[in-house]
Image: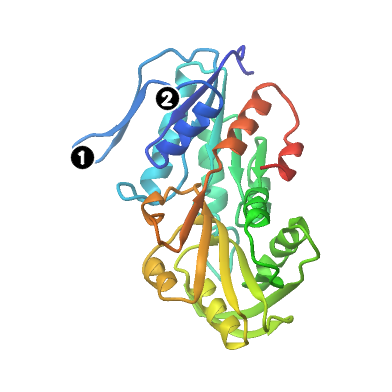
């Protein structure tokens, strides 16, 4: 039984504090006065300096690696904050997880594999979250791993709005899915853009983990401006191989976009050395240091759509209108 729910309260972990601040600004409120610190042995401690009894609390924390945190640090921070809020009698606790780490471990791909995405869902639930708000899960079925409500936002409206405003001087566009798994996303992207934009699909295989090889391209790309669309870019092997293949087949220019810019390992170097003219990503994982003048990287904010989702959740309104906005 939830206690009486009062005002909206936003609390930030250390994985994406700027996004949490921006969400709070959009809601015309301020962050909860709190600190997440480490003891000398590395244990995480949460200090919440104001009452949250009966409040509608939203914990903003991406489960990702940052300059200061590992993925596991981010996850533990989230769990400990939720536990602290539960024990402080928060009215309702919503885990706002813009990037859901471990989402790629969503099934048993081979014998004795863990299903870590389900484990993380269980941990968040047991910690005390009453609902989850996230964006572009790598596998949509992860929603079913939770026994609490999950609101699943889409980054597509933000990205398509950006490209609708971008001038391509009348060039023929083609939206390209970098693999078969992203076809539905690329089709949705093409449908939301102004005009009748065709699609192409890249057939790839993975000879080993984090290694991809392009086999063939299905669709007409010669002489066109291509936009590669994916949910996340990690090591950038898939997106760079796709861009190289498109240029080999006579594509004039290649652009790329994704929701989650993970950019691990040699990803930044690969992208900078690739034919990709511009790579657009959302700040579900903050990488603002990549976006300087003359850089290939462009970061768009998800704060407005998350703020509106928080407002609608608080007032028990539908989130469906958000899927075509921003």
Q: Mark 2 = which residue?
A: 84
**Of residues 226 and 96, the one drawn nearer to the viewer in this rendering:** 226
Q: Which mark is residue 41?
A: 1
* 34 in relation to 219, above or below: above
**Of residues 211 and 76, the one drawn nearer to the viewer in this rendering:** 211
Question: Looking at the image, which residue is at 40% across and 43% down?
Answer: 74
- Label 2: state its secondary structure: helix
**Of residues 244 and 36, the one drawn nearer to the viewer in this rendering:** 244
Residue at the left extreme of this rendering: 40
Which of the colour schemes (rainbow, by chain, secondary structure, one colour) is used?
A: rainbow
Question: Looking at the image, which residue is at 49% across and 76% down?
Answer: 275
Residue 269 in the image, given as x and y percentages of width and height: 37, 70
* 168 in relation to 211, above or below: above
State how many labels appear.
Answer: 2
User: Crowding at label 1, few (<14), some or many (≥20) Cα neighbours within 10 Å?
Assistant: few
- Label 1: state its secondary structure: loop
User: Crowding at label 2, few (<14), some or many (≥20) Cα neighbours within 10 Å?
Assistant: some
């Amino acid at each position: 039984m939830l206690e009486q729910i009062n005002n909206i309260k936003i609390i930030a972990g250390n994985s994406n504090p700027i996004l949490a601040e921006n969400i709070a600004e959009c809601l015309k409120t301020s962050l909860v006065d709190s600190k997440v610190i480490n003891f000398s042995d590395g244990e995480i401690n949460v200090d919440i300096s104001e009452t949250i009894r009966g409040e509608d609390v939203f914990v903003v924390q991406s489960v990702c690696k940052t300059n200061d945190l590992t993925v596991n640090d981010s996850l533990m921070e989230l769990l400990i904050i939720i536990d602290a809020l539960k024990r402080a009698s928060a009215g309702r606790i919503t885990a706002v997880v813009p990037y859901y780490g471990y989402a790629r471990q969503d099934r048993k791909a081979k014998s004795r594999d863990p299903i870590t995405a389900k484990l993380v869902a269980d941990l968040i639930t047991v910690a005390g979250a009453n609902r989850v708000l996230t964006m572009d899960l790598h596998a949509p079925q992860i929603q079913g791993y939770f026994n609490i409500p999950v609101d699943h936002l889409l980054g597509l409206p933000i990205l398509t709005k950006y490209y609708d405003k971008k001038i391509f001087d009348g060039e023929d566009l083609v939206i390209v899915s970098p693999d078969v798994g992203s076809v539905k996303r690329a089709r949705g992207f093409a449908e939301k853009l102004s005009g009748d934009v065709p699609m192409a699909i890249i057939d790839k295989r993975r000879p080993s983990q984090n290694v991809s090889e392009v086999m063939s391209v299905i669709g007409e790309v010669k002489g066109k401006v291509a936009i590669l669309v994916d949910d996340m870019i990690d090591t950038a092997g898939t997106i760079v191989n796709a861009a190289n293949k498109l240029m080999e087949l006579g594509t004039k220019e290649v652009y790329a976009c994704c929701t989650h810019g993970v950019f691990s390992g040699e990803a930044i170097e690969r992208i900078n050395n690739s034919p990709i003219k511009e790579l657009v990503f959302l700040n579900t994982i903050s990488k603002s240091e990549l976006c300087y003048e003359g850089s290939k990287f462009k970061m768009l904010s998800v704060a407005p759509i998350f703020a509106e989702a928080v407002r609608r959740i608080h007032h028990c309104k539908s989130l469906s209108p958000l899927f075509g906005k921003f």
